[in-house]
Amino acid sequence: MTLPPDHQHPPEDDTWSTFPDQCVVLVIVRTLTSAVVALETLKLFRGDSDVQVRFAIDSGTAFHAGVEELLTDVAPGHHPPLDEAGSLRPCLVLTASENVDLSPFTCPIVLVQHGIGFNKYVPDSRTQEVRLSGVPRPEFTDWPNLTTLLGHPAQREQLVAAGLHTLAKSSEVVGDPAHDAMRASGHLRDRYRAALGLEDGQTLVAVSSTWGPESLIGRHRHLPGDLLAELPHDTHRVALVLHPNAWSWHSPWHVHNTYADALEAGLLLIPPERGWGATLLAADVVLGDHGSVTLYAAGIRRPVLLASDGGADSVSGTPAEELRSIAPRLAVDAPLAPQIQRAIADHHPGAYDAWAARTFAHVDDAHTHLRDVLYQRLGRRPPTAPPWRPALPQPQPRPAARPVTAFEIHTRHVDGSAGPAASDRTVEVVRHPASVRSPRDVAGTYRHLAVAESHPNTALTHLASVVYTEAPTVASARAWTEIALDSFPGCLLTAATAGDEGRVAIRGADTWHVHGVLGLDTSVWSAAVYARLRSGASLEGTHVVRVARSTHVITVTTHSPDPQVAAQSPPT
């Protein structure tokens, strides 16, 4: 909603106020990160009509992109620049950015942390040197009206050790609301997994990266794609949680473009403004660095593998450094799947409990402590009811996850299988997304490229050994398979599904009928046919198809006089 011009600027008094005797809380937002944290903090004023929230924007940062869009979405109205905000005469200034100019304000000021402690050195845009992330600018560290909120008493000790005695004395230890919110939302794990599209039994690998050259993505930008290429598609999913500063500096377009192939392969890209906490709860293992999101993962007892330790960015004696000494490392140049399996299997829930006790204070009570400080600085009594502590919002990948339609597939005949068919009629199918593929032969398997007719990259489609589609009717399925052989001269066979029946056309041979394929992806059941064809075995009859943890039975028939089809060597 856009306000009329004469109502865009708040009044200097209560002349036009519907709610008299209000206190103005001025929220200063500078970066996307600080805006998200500030908006979460404001939920503690829920239902209080005596508190009038106003926003001011400090755009003097390289990480400002996305701030105005976020505020327009959740808090439409006029958001003046910081140099005009002094006329609002606030009762309290609230900000989650330590780098804002606080000089216009003599009222109480509360600085909320946007992460866990003072763990990193970051570049200072004003001095071209480095500074301790989370600490206010030097000219404001002695301000008597400034209160810095801390998550643990050890952070106060760190300020004292850094010579910031006044800042340490005026600080308040309230705990970590983000950590508490994740703990309180743990019972929604299955809902979060469903929102991410996970199926029962699938393993979610979350990749967490802060920003800068020492971050995980700064050092190993191809890791999400490497994971997708190596981990079987039917048993694993991969999510990327990227720091908002990377989104702001490089732009969402650049992030999407960088990971275009990974997105085509099923990467779940979590937007910077919501969903990262729920993604950690949904994850089975987290690959991270020295950023706060990785620390939160350890704090909620997730298995953690460190792919980057932060190098010169890390501050000694902090939770990030301590975690580096106790968490296992990820060797990015070694096979990834065995390391992930080992991290999950070897992890025990209490592995990081002692570390967490030295990192998070007032556990499960941070919202109450934070609200008490805010109201105290306002000079008002807090509400008697417990503070509002909303469940974490469901993760919504951006762009929305889309089905994978191109696969590198490995198939093999399984010996000693039980079921309605002989062992040589049981085929195991393992799929890997082809858009991030690193084709390799695996002993004892047949490898082929299977691509849906609708796949956006026609280069892959014309390389495929198997081209497949979904058809509206059985008749149209048969017609399509025969026509598609001419459209894709490099493929060995074409396959189409119509309801619970499938059709396969084989180059130089007849069209086959496949029954029992309802609920089975065409790329899977056609892979079983391909494996039989490569092995020189008979196609006709009943076959067992194994994919991930599921087993399916299909029946292949033909109306031709001679159902035997000679084995052919397909292109790869």
Image (cartoon, grey):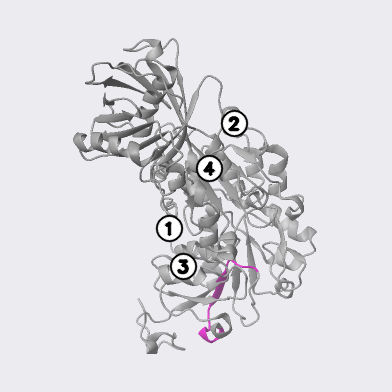
> Do the CB atoms of the residues marked 1 and 4 lie less than 8 Å apart?
no
Give 160 or 128, whichever is nearer the viewer.
128
Distance from the alpha carbon under mark 2 to that under mark 3: 38 Å
Q: Nearer the viewer, mark 1 or mark 4?
A: 4
Q: CA distance from mark 1 to mark 4?
A: 44 Å
What is the C-alpha distance between the residues marked 3 and 1?
A: 22 Å
Residue position marked by numbered label 2 in the rendering: 347
Query: Is 159 a magenta residue?
Result: no
Q: Is residue 130 above or below residue 488?
A: below
- Picture quadrant where residue 390 is located: bottom left
* Residue drawn at the location 33% of the way across and 18% of the way down: 539
> Residue 359: percent from the left, percent from the top?
65, 48
First in residue order: circle 4 vs circle 2: 2
Q: Is residue 549 above or below residue 171?
A: above
SS for callout 2:
loop
Residue behind mark 3: 70
Reading the image, the residue beneath label 1 is 388
Name the residue beneath numbered marker 4: 436
* Neighbours of disc 2 within 10 Å: few (<14), some (14-19), many (20+): some
Identify the element where label 4 is drawn: helix
Q: Amino acid at mark 3?
A: Leu
Three-letter amino acid code at the position of disc 4: Val
Q: Is residue 95 magenta?
A: yes
Which residues fall within the magenta stretch? Answer: 86-98
